[in-house]
Image (cartoon, grey):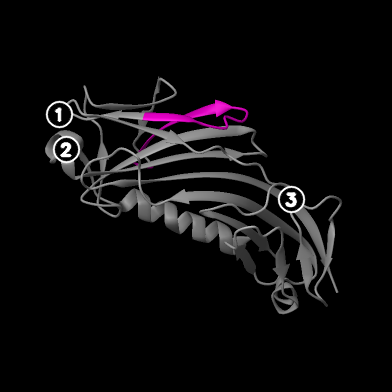
Amino acid sequence: MKRVFILSLGIALIAVSCAKDNSANVNQDSIYSIYELFYDEDADKTTARATFRFGGQTGTLLELDAPAGVTFNGEELLWNELTGVHKKEYTGLTTSGNFVYTDLDENVFTNDIGTIDPIGFPTEVDTISMSSAFDFAWTGNPVGPNETITLTINGTTGGNAEIFTTILEGGTSLTLAANKLDNLGIGEATCYLKRTYNFSTVNEGTSEGGRVAVWYTLQKTIYIKE
């Protein structure tokens, strides 16, 4: 499982190392907004997260200065110093809602978030053979517009991980190629399944714009055999 965890750690360190500033120090119309809602089935927890950057989606992370602020379904999202985002966690599945961001110029931007669409592992799939391709037909709706389905499998061979993904609208399965399964090695493998909806523009935002994303994740241990 090392590769995925190391990659995740690397991403986290990059995020933390990014420069941070306060929104009072920048032009309010140059603030780029990112709104995210995601559910972790294993933790049974939904997280609403808003990120603000100066000058575009890779710009300086911003902490909002009062009276500026951001809410989700009417509840304030608090600044997290470690990750550089404003967020709030909820018990259970919160399928949708709206973000309201008010800047220091008293402009108000409201963005409704798309519904989180559940996804699940194929029923009673506990073992996969590496000797032939496998048709991984998830439970849940087919791929919708602007959606991505991703399955990441952490194997036993040198911390190897293989990623399978599709954006084919209407698709209902992933083809797990035999050569990729063979790379995983024999033994228990941890699988991470994720349905993501991405929209590249916000409904309401500054001249700099923004984006929206929702996703649903879960994991399962399976056995890779010859």
Judge whether 44 appears above or below 219 on screen. above
Residue 128 spot, x, y in % from top left:
82, 65
Instruction: State if disc 2 and disc 1 touch (CB < 8 Å).
Output: yes
Identified by mark 2, the residue type is Gln
Identified by mark 3, the residue type is Lys
Number of residues whose C-alpha sits closer than 10 Å to that of mark 2, classed few (under 14), some (14–19) or many (20 or more): some
- Which of these two is toward me, 77 or 1? 77
Residue at point 53% right, 32% down? 96
Residue 223 spot, x, y in % from top left:
82, 61
Question: Of the residues under marks 1 and 2, which one precedes in the sequence?
Answer: 2
Q: What element carries label 1?
A: loop
Residue 5 spot, x, y in % from top left:
56, 57
Rendered image: mark on residue 28 = 2
Name the quarter where the C terminus is drawn: bottom right
Mark closer to the observer (2, 3): 2
Judge whether 102 appears above or below 40 on screen. above
Residue at point 62% right, 46% down? 217
Kindly tell me whether residue 162 is visible in this rendering: yes
Residue 37 spot, x, y in % from top left:
49, 38
Residue at point 64% right, 36% down? 43
Instruction: State if disc 3 and disc 2 touch (CB < 8 Å).
Output: no
Give the residue number, with chain letter if any, for mark 3: 220
Number of residues whose C-alpha sits closer than 10 Å to that of mark 3, classed few (under 14), some (14–19) or many (20 or more): some
Kindly tell me whether residue 159 is visible in this rendering: no
Q: In this view, does 186 lie to the left or right of 103?
A: right
* Residue 94 falls inside the magenta stretch: yes
- Which of these two is toward me, 127 or 208? 208
Segment tinted magenta in the rendering: 83-99
- Which of these two is toward me, 110 or 102? 110
Alpha carbons under labels 1 and 2: distance apart: 7 Å
Alpha carbons under labels 1 and 3: distance apart: 47 Å
